[in-house]
Image (tube, rainbow, N blue to C red):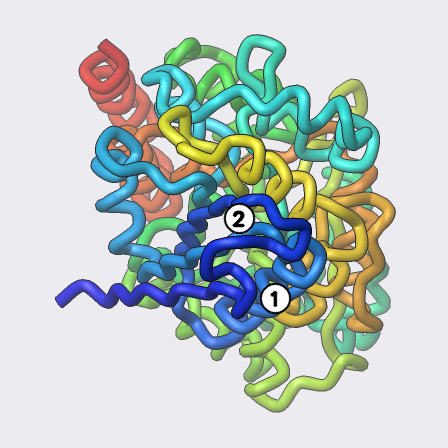
Amino acid sequence: MTSLFKTTLIGAAAMAMTVSGSFASDLIITFDDLNPGPKAAFEAAVEKFKGENPDINVTVNINDREAHKTAIRNFLTADAPDVTTWYAGNRMRPFVDAGLFADVSDVWEANGFSETLASTKPSMTVDGKQYGVPYTYYQWGVYYRKDIFDKLGLSEPKTWDEFLAAMRTINDSGVKPLTIGTKFLWPAAGVFDYLNLRQNGYDFHNQLTAGEVKYTDPRVRETFARWKEMLDAGGWVDNHATMDWQEGMSLFIKGEAAMYVMGNFAVGSMRDGGLTDDQIDFFQFPVINPDIANAEEAPTDTWHMPTNAKNKENAKKWLAFVAREDVQTEWNKSMGQLPINSKSSVGDDKFLQEGFATLNAAAGIAQFYDRDAPAEMAKAGMEGFQEFMVKPDRLDAILERLDKVQERVYK
């Protein structure tokens, strides 16, 4: 049964009139996360907004995230809220192309967001116009066992050759260089994205996930050539196709693997498993092509104004509010993620601090393969990535199969 509830938040003075004597106006907000941390952070932001805008009656709908994904197209075309949460990049674009998300470039211009939200502006832009604002994200990268690195005399690799050399040294010591769990496919997509971003760049990543480049393209083959080099340098733990990401994490915690290409949400599992911050650390995925500026993987959650919104002036007030530096500071501290506004501050957690610096310096922010590519293409692609990790000699067949899926999906 879909989990869905609705809370109406109306100030006592909003029965009919505001203090000034004019009629109160409305704002209907739809949010997509019932988990305690994000829900509490959102509700605190709503209370702050109400305090600053006592003349606005705020109605809040909070949906389960999966239910939201299923329902969004229906409510955007039927009875749209004034603002709703969604995702950046190509997950946003279909609603823009269908005329369901409104252009809010004026909000960006009026609030200087092209500067303060610069790291994610490309992923919020279609044909030079912005169609929402981001409010939270978290970095991906390479998390590693610093104690194992120290024991082997290794430092954080910056270049591709240094990375492969570190992998060989770790493998020779009897520890697997990398852990992963690909049972549910998506962790392999993180590896593919970073290899492709570092080999071919941010624009190429978007061209591929938009169906503009074939998987048999020589540039994609070069991405897989780098992946093969990782396999040849010792690669990943055995039997990763039978494990989920948390089972892969257990091998990292036990010291049977030294590195994990993963999102920052995994740090909690590392700490819960008994690792201290002296034992774990983080580095950016190394440079492969020095001519390519470093883009990063950072799934971004966003706010949008539906084209059918009834209270657009108030919707734009909300969009300006949630992208403001102080609001993003408080919101993200509350739920342990990163603000996107470059003037915001983050907590003392070392991983958030390093992630914030990394993402603010990024040449572009990729939204993760299964957000940037259509669902059917993403599923086929991730199946192919997992298959390649187990049977790299099947590469030609995998890429040819993905070309056929691409032709069907992007018609």
Q: Residue at x 18, y 15 (%)?
A: 408
Q: Residues within 10 Å of mark 1 (few under 14, many from 20)?
A: few
Asked which quadrant contains residue 353, the reply is bottom right
Q: 242 or 15: nearer the eye?
A: 15
Instruction: Tell whether 302 sits left or right of 183.
Output: right
Q: Position of residue 203 (x, y in %)?
A: 60, 17
Q: Is residue 198 left or right of residue 204?
A: right
Please identify the quadrant where the N terminus is shown. bottom left
- Identify the image quadrant of the C terminus: top left
Disc 1 secondary structure class: helix
Horizontal and vertical percent position of residue 249: 50, 72
Question: Is 257 above or below relative to 375?
Answer: below
Q: Nearer the viewer, residue 76 or 55?
A: 55
Question: Dot 1 corresponds to which residue?
Answer: 47
Residue at the image position 56 percent from the left and 74 percent from the top: 252
- Which sits in the foreground, 59 or 195? 59
Q: How far is disc 2 from disc 1 in space, using C-alphas?
A: 17 Å
Q: Which residue is mark 2?
A: 24
Q: Residue at x 63, y 48 (%)?
A: 135
Mark closest to the chain's N terminus, 2 or 1: 2
